Image (cartoon, helix red, strand yellow):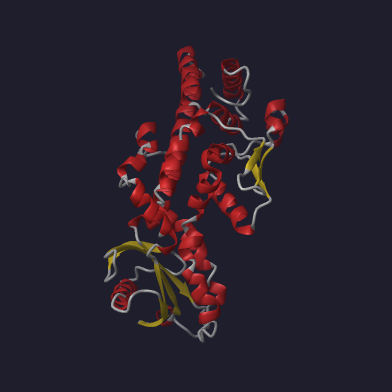
Amino acid sequence: MFTSQTSSFQDSIDVEEKDADFDNEELSAYSQKIQQINCYYSIYYYQSTSLTLLDSSLPSEAEPELRCYISRRLSKGALLGGMGNIATVELSIPEQAAGCYCCLLEQERSPEQSEADGNGWVVCLLGGSEKVSTFRIELDKYVQGLRRSLTPEMQNLESEVRPYLSLWYEESVMHVHRVVQLVQANVAYLLHAALSQTHVEVVGADERTRIDMARFVKAASLQGLVQEEPAPVQLCRTSSERSHAHLLIDCSASTPTFTNAVSNRFCDDWIQAFLNAAERFNPFLLRQILENFKLKAIQDMNNLKRFIRQAETSHYALFRCCLFLRGCGNGDVLLRNARAEHSGLAEACAIIRVLQEFLTEQAPGSPGTSQ
């Protein structure tokens, strides 16, 4: 069963109100500095118990402080090979306290070497916020992408390693912000596609935009948490569901156009939260809102599953289930996921068919969309 720590829908979409407010003058100034956000990196060669600095963008007075911190972590065995570790560190930088992501990339050992004699590289990425943890998956993947460029001699430091590390914030953190800025209120279509496991095709865009879109949809989806519909169930889909087989986004013009775009009230309710966070140029807040969006969807799926189990023996529970679907605004997605999960249970399938009919009657002019 899914679990969620989200207390209420309003708490979820109002998370941006806890962030600092900006007036128009501050927003304008911040907009000009968006490419100059203070973020840093350091990379060390690790051999047995010693650390050797290879490169760093930290101020000269701050780098030794970070090296001392990393040495303590290594001596305690707190850095495991290939696993990112995130903590808040206090350094001699303008932010004073910064979110620090550290990862140990171990060098392949020879058969004669013991674990205590292991060599490798320690990569540290520091952002201006302790909320860098919200991008742990992206940072893990980005640092692993550096592995193929690492050699003991580091002859490619200036040509490959340094440029790669210099772009970590732009590539691993800013993609959610870029997508919201590009699509604006149409972000609801991406959210709906992610929840409903709808294929998204992007045309007329550069490579970065296509990758950004794909990463946004993947981050918003519940892939791995919900079952996909088996083939027999897919064949029983309505014609309206088949007509929305994929979402096409054409980015050839300055404003993207959407074909087969589908949303619902649940996704629409999150639009303003995303736009507000994008206006504040706060990628960490945007990612937190995205996570809250997913948690709320999971919470609603849990509720629906519980109601379906209760409805097998209680007509009142079936009535409550209908009221819930009408009120949540996400009935089309919830029923699709419930149908996949209960495809082999006759009683549950019968209840889901009743609920599907109820939902269709509630929105006769807009199949597949809750009103």
In this rendering, the answer to whether 300 lies above or below 65 is above
Q: As drawn, is 322 to the left or to the right of 356?
A: left
Residue 159: give x, y in percent of width and height.
55, 79
In this rendering, the answer to whether 240 lies above or below 151 is above
Residue 46: give x, y in percent of width and height.
41, 80
In this rendering, the answer to whether 127 lies above or below 334 is below
Residue 115: give x, y in percent of width and height.
43, 78
Total labels drawn: 0
Residue, x 45% and y 13% (percent of image)? 316
Q: As drawn, is 307 to the left or to the right of 65?
A: right
Residue 72: give x, y in percent of width and height.
29, 74
* Residue at the extreme front: 25
Q: Nearer the viewer, residue 147 or 59?
A: 59
Within the image, what quadrant is residue 229 found in? Answer: top right
Q: Is any part of residue 164 visible from this angle?
A: yes
In this rendering, the answer to whether 69 lies above or below 215 is below
Within the image, what quadrant is residue 250 found in? Answer: top right
Q: Nearer the viewer, residue 362 or 278?
A: 278
Q: Is any part of residue 1 visible from this angle?
A: no
Q: Nearer the viewer, residue 48 or 327?
A: 327
Residue, x 71% and y 31% (percent of image)? 243
Residue, x 52% and y 19% (percent of image)? 312
